[in-house]
Image (cartoon, rainbow, N blue to C red):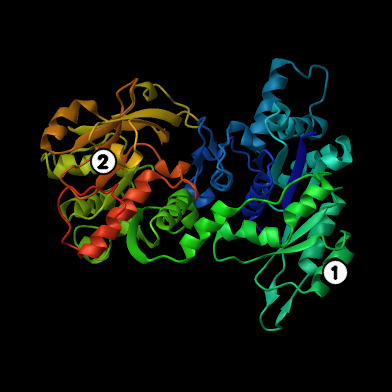
Amino acid sequence: MNTKYIFITGGVASSLGKGIIAASLAKLLQARGLRVTIQKFDPYLNIDPGTLNPYEHGECYVTEDGAETDLDLGHYERFLGVYTSQANNVTTGRIYHTVITREREGAYLGKTVQIVPHITDEIKRRMLLLGQTGDYDVILTEIGGTVGDIESQPFIEAMRQLRWELPENDTLSIHLTLIPYLKAAKELKTKPTQHSVQELQSLGVHPDIIVCRTEKELSPEIRHKIALFCNVRPGHVIQSIDAWSIYQVPLNMEDEQLDRLAAERLGITWLPQPNLDALKDFLARLINPSGEVDIALVGKYVELQDAYKSILESFVHAGAACSCKVNVHPVHSEHIDEGNVGTVLEKMDGILVAPGFGGRGLEGKIVAVRYARENGIPFLGICLGMQMAVVEFARNVLGYTDAASTEVDPDTAHPVIDMMEDQKKTTIKGGTMRLGAYKCRLAEGSLARRLYGCDEIAERHRHRYEFNDAYRAEMTAAGLSVSGSNPETGLVEIIEIPSHPFFIATQFHPEYKSTPEKPQPLFTGFIRASIARREQGKGKASGNRDASDPR
């Protein structure tokens, strides 16, 4: 069987959930026995989202091979349980950079370099790259942006050319649009969808399936009307109604027979029914929790929930694993200090201090760490959260009141967090951090080792600064344990306080590898510890409790 290509575009409005629809369809095809992956083509000129502010673009997701990518790749991995890579996320910037570099090298001597064919040829090459490996039966390609955007047009044109060049049954076009509901008129309106499809058709692409995002059920009459005026086959207009969880969407799409329609259009007729038992079991646990906990998420981008998307999803996975509803309370680190920390955090069952960059809001994170440490509240720190836990310990336990990270105070007398040695000569910002999966050896008898259930792991990183090893012996003597380190470089990866009920922080990002079917061990341990604190009564938890104990 030839590799099949499914293209997913969006219209009317952004943020309709193309990534979720792509991941849901991929999940259904995978559950039918096909080898599937998804790639995202983004229309912005950045080479990758690594230098973008989270307020601009949400979370920057990091793959196993160290690619800084769009957050949709996190959805792809969580739904499929299959790693993505550098090849799964391509931007306009990367396309232009490749073409211009080739031009400077003389690859196009004598030719006028143009959008068509040179840019579109490079886009097509990237679109086909994963399919040429022989590892996949179906490649889903999500085109970022909205049809009609100027910056998306080269991708649409490349898609049009591929649909013309490849065999007819090897490609499929799905268009996701919005069907708005006018409350005053009590009516669903199809005209925006008609206009969006007309725009797409004017660019030479005729969708095979139209998926309508809606908050109300689409009647057969509305579906027929859309099919008639958008020139798609009857029965090929399906609804994507608002769901109570994104993980419900694959089941909704199965009910709408999206996977069957896609398979038929691609000439795949031998597929068994999808096996979705594991997903259904996860959803059953998610919707029927036996308890709940309140968790403070202390960060400086909390106004935008997509900035911490993988962390929030990891809480969903861990909550289901523990039969517990996790109520996440965003706490802006700029709005917390010694004067109000008790008021803000005293009702919390657990505190997570989130990753980030720069000096803004750091003191609030340090205050939150101290409150968790001194009051026996389960604590999880990630990346910058781990670094601020080290700074807090140095200031308030070792007595180094000016201890800091050199990221914000290069002249501190106690640089307990310092720039990695191999980063000190780096001047280029994009793609130069310590990125991707690195090994971590876990100390015998440590909380980390009990939670993971093994002595060595590999987790993903995104940082330039690290624990300053010159302070390790002093901190260890004072009660801060280094429970995880890189076996090759000795870089500190995990710290713990063994005398605390649950206090653990990591230089890596554990949230990137959590999935519904394989929740991240640190998050499940954190939630179990938070449940135990709630059951024992807030403020009464003490001692070195084994948080890996499922009780």
Instruction: Between label 1 and label 2, give the one nearer the viewer.
Output: 2
Percent of width and height locating residue 357:
38, 42
Percent of width and height locating residue 16:
64, 59
**108, above or below 377, in the image:** above
Percent of width and height locating residue 251:
63, 59
Dot 1: element: helix
Q: Nearer the viewer, residue 435 or 432?
A: 435
Q: Nearer the viewer, residue 100 or 484?
A: 484
The quadrant the C terminus occupies is bottom left
Distance between the alpha carbons at the discs numbered 1 and 2: 59 Å
The residue that label 1 is drawn on is 224
The residue that label 2 is drawn on is 447
**Residue 411 can be seen in this image:** no
The quadrant the N terminus occupies is top right
Q: Residue at x 88, y 41 (%)?
A: 168
The amino acid pointed to by label 1 is His
Compared across the picture, whether 91 is left or right of 545 comes to right
Compared across the picture, whether 66 is left or right of 199 comes to left
**460, above or below 17, in the image:** above
